[in-house]
Image (cartoon, rainbow, N blue to C red):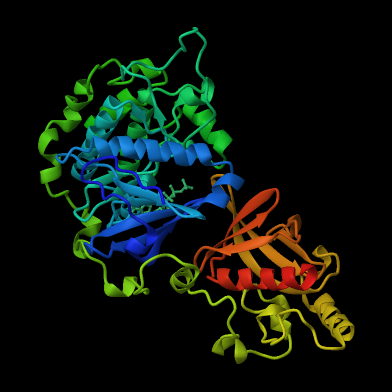
Amino acid sequence: MDSETNNQSIVPKKEPNDFIFGRVLGEGSFSTVYLAKDIQTSKEFAIKVCEKRHILREKKQQYVKREKEVLMLLSKHAKTSAPFFVRLFCTFQDHSSLYFVLTRATNGDLLTYLQKAEKFEEEVAQFYTAELVHAVEHMHLLGVIHRDLKPENILLDTHRHILITDFGSAKIIPQPPFLPETENSDGTARRSSFVGTAQYVSPEILTDKRSSPASDLWAIGCILYQMLDGNPPFQARSEYAIFQKILKLEFQYPSLFPSVAQDFISKLLVIDSKERLGAQDFGGYPSIKNHRFFESIDFDTLYLKTPPWPTKCRDVAELASEVSDPSEFLNTEPGLSGQQLSKLLGLQLNDEPSEQSRNSAPTPSKDALTSTSSANNVLSQPMKKGLINFPVNEQQLQARLLQQQETQSQWHNLVDKKLILKQGLIDKRKGLFSRRRMFLLTTGPNLYYVDPSSMVLKGQVPFGLTLKAEPKNFKNFHIHTPGRTYYLEDPEGFALEWCKALEEVRKHYYD
Ligand code: ATP
């Protein structure tokens, strides 16, 4: 067990058994974040659990290493007067996973808050932008460029102050800070791969792949615009089209957009990064803080203030409690062993069929073959010997079901005339975007996916001995194949059923 101590107040030598793990707070592309309670102090944290196998498979070692480095640096230099970052209390590991013990953000993220409010009044936007500027100033003084600032990465603490998170794309720049990173010592331009999120990425990252602290200032401009308008300034149907708009600085202020905010944003959304407000400052951002937009803000006492409520949220204005509802902790035993994990995710992978499935129809009906619901299909029926262990006259039964499928299922011709064992609409995530696909698990075995609007077969998840379906929660699951991991979300919440079915089929054919 390896444990870090990056600050005197950091708890040394922790391990999973020092915590009771509660509900899943969220999921990243290679991590699951759990609510957790320290059994000694009863203090609550968010513990991010990254599976080592998954990190290696996705080649995300650098990403995780960077996130840890930056979190340690920021936690070591945390300011009690402006603790605007998620704090890393300790890290540890066991044979399968890495654990990051973090401040728990009890009030969700800024994007969700903003969506609830639709948009913020100027006073609210001004307050959150001021916190953001203060936090970014501190971060830049420590030599950290975030490079993926966006409302989703700004969490809110119990009192709705900001907690910046997600440092996987961050960069630690050589001192002295505040000098744009333009060249290496040998005079060659430093280049890095594209990082960040399309809507908030700055033009210099798109053109010469160079980031500087001013790239975060651009993102602040985009976030403020979004707070006041409800949508980010650069929007289009594809990433490419968004990039074109950014490079042409193609955006408009709607009428009635507050004029002082407009002036401030226009000084941040400047193509030449050196010309952005603050880019020439040294040792802080006085030129930003002195802009008229912040006239009524005292940066030194921001954290002592109660953040203003957006009008739309005033009637539901209640603060999340510092301590969670006990029902958020299904487990009473510490640790995150297989058994505890199953409980948290509601998994009973090796159990008898549930009461519900025991009561379902014994033979496939028309609905079973045509429904889009993941629950209704051949595989949802109780088959004690295994989901696709057809009875003795298997061939005959299959032939009969196939006949039925041919006349009743719109998907029949897309699956090479194989018998559909399970089907359902699944959101398949690739990069930034998700696409809804009809997934069809068939004999063979094959797992096809089809664009349901054009009825075009888009591809197959390659089935094989090593295919592994990994449930993450009721909706999300991953399918690991030797060459690729598929990130999937069943909007109807049948992720567990999908994983069971895939495992049954894999076993039937390969074990
Ligand atoms: P990716 O790994 O793809 O960049 P991400 O940054 O959202 O995604 P994580 O940092 O693993 O991934 O977070 C996953 C989700 O967990 C977040 O979207 C958020 O909902 C929740 N979460 C993360 N950190 C905390 C926290 N400190 N407190 C409360 N919830 C959190």
The answer to whether 212 is drawn above or below residue 424 in the figure is above
Q: Position of residue 36 (x, y in %)?
A: 33, 62
- The residue at 26%/28% (across/down) is 264
Asked where in the image residue 131 lies, by quadrant, the reply is top left
Residue closest to the eye, 39 or 277: 39
* 216 displayed left or right of 52: left
* 74 displayed left or right of 438: left
Q: In which quarter of the image is the C terminus?
A: bottom right
Q: Position of residue 223 (x, y in %)?
A: 34, 38
Q: Position of residue 106 (x, y in %)?
A: 27, 58
Residue closest to the eye, 459 or 113: 459
The answer to whether 411 is drawn above or below residue 5 in the figure is below
- The residue at 29%/27% (across/down) is 142
Residue 149: in sight, yes or no? no
Q: Where is residue 81 in the image (x, y as percent from the top left)?
A: 14, 39
The answer to whether 84 is drawn above or below residue 98 in the figure is above
* 443 displayed left or right of 282: right
- The residue at 80%/63% (across/down) is 414
* 464 displayed left or right of 68: right
The answer to whether 206 is drawn above or below residue 16 in the figure is above
